[in-house]
Structures are given as C-alpha cells and as structure tokens.
Amino acid sequence: MPRQTSTYDLLMAPSAERQGAADLYAQLRGAILAGQLAPGARLPASRVLAASQGVARGTVVAAYEQLIAEGYLQSRVGSGTRVSAVLPDSLLAVAQARRSAAAHSPPAAAPALSQRGALLARSPFGAFPLPAAGVPFAAHVPALQEFPVRLWATLAARQARALGPSAMADGDAMGHLPLRQAIAEYLGGTRGLACRAEQVLVLASVQQAVDLVARLLLDAGDAAWCEDPGYAGTQAALRAAGVRVCPVPVDD
C-alpha cells in the first residue's frame, strides 16, 4: 500500500537559514494550493511540528495563526488544525470573475419609479455636496460663524457621559419631550402662541414637515396656494403629493 504524504514530507529539512514563521507559512500555503494538503487534512500539533523542524513552537504558532487569519486553515477545540474546505483563493477568483462580468455587462436599466417617486426625483434639492463657503442672503442658513461650537461640544460631552442604557432605546416618535417642552415655552414667549409640548412634533427638516402636512391634510388633485416667488421646496413637496400648486404673486 503506498505511503501517504505527510506534512513533514512536504517541508524542507530544518536548516539554520530557514527559521522564520514566514518561511513555514509560505511552504504550508504552497502545499495547500498545490493540493498536497487536501481540504480537511489535519496538521500536526504546533509542538510536534516545531520539534520535527527544529524551530521554536512560537514560529509554528505564528505561521498557523497567519494561515487561519487568511482562511487557509481552521482551528477548533477537539478537532485540531485542519485545511479549510473552501480556500480563500477560490473565493477571490469567483469575486474577480463577477467583477469582470459586471464591467463588461451593459448598464442596468434605471428602476421604474412611481409617479410620486418621479416627482421626488425632480426635487430642486439634489444629492450633491453643498458649497463650503456660505451663500450670501440664503434665507435658510443662519450665521454659522456665530454658533458657540466649543461651548456646544463641552455641554454635549457632559451630557454624553451621563447617558444610561435607556438612552439607546427607542425614543418618543414625537421627539425628545424636554426639547418639545422647551420649544413650546419659546413659542409662547416669543410668538404669543398658547402651545403645549403635546402639540409639538420634532422633524428633521422643513421638507419633511411640508411633506407630512401635505399627506395628512391634502388629497391628490387638491389645490394649494403658494406665494410666487417663494420657497421651492414647498412646491416640490406639494407636487410630489399630487397637489396642484397655484402660484400667488407676492406684492412688491
């Protein structure tokens, strides 16, 4: 019966010139890729292989760990160290073939949007980077240079250190209650509005607010008056909701 090739036979005889983990790693990897170490083959224990090669056990451990990290070997308690059933090189070849096929494939057709989706896609607010410098007389941009960034960072860090597990849970769908209370008090003092926190809804943007109002209060085909010239985002949100926008000229 022919003798089966062992791991020891695949490695060069120990020498003073070959003592590094990189050399052992390269030989084992080469044997795996050449099929000399078949998938599922069990490798010797690190102490045994180190003694047979005349190297430190740490050298074998380092080579094994590198091969495990790269996916050539698998190590399980009670099962030892074995050659992986699926080698990373085969996965890489599949990925490269897919990328090559994708590069030579015709471009995919744009997804079919609903009428509402098509209207939203024509929003005047595209997904493009904003200019770094401020735009003069922009109505929706405050004086950002006046914002107390350092004070804000200090207060934010102080509050972050006091956070508990409850802060990671789902919050109020209406918005943070203390914030809504502060907004209600502000509106009462500065705008004279008799407003309660239960009537305040915190949203991400003006666009989101207009879109929500349009969908709650208007049906498709309803008419809405908008000042002209006016905020383009309002008209875009209304049109996306199927509302007929009726421009109302603004007096000089």
Image (cartoon, rainbow, N blue to C red):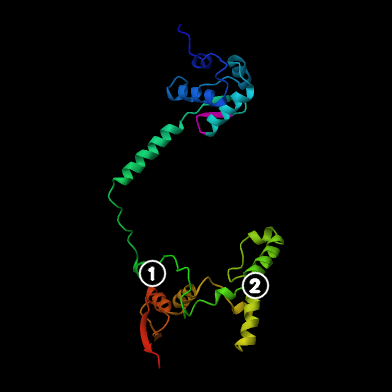
The reply to whether residue 195 is visible in this rendering is no
**Residue 126, image x and y in percent?**
40, 68
Q: Residues within 10 Å of mark 2 (few under 14, many from 20)?
A: some
Q: Is residue 178 above or below residue 34?
A: below
Q: Which residues are magenta?
A: 70-75
* Residue nearest the viewer, comparing 213 with 203: 203
Write the residue at 62% across / 77% down: 198
Q: Residue pushed farthest right?
A: 162
Q: Is residue 188 above or below residue 92?
A: below
Residue 65 is drawn in which quadrant? top right
Q: Which mark is residue 177?
A: 2
- The tally of labels here is 2
Residues under labels 2 and 1: Cα distance?
A: 31 Å
Q: Which mark is residue 131?
A: none
Q: Is residue 58 above or below residue 128?
A: above
The reply to whether residue 229 is visible in this rendering is yes
In the rendered view, does 93 fall on the left or right side of 77?
Answer: left
Write the residue at 35% across / 66% down: 114
Q: Which residue is mark 1?
A: 120
Q: Amino acid at mark 2?
A: Leu
Q: Secondary structure at mark 1?
A: helix
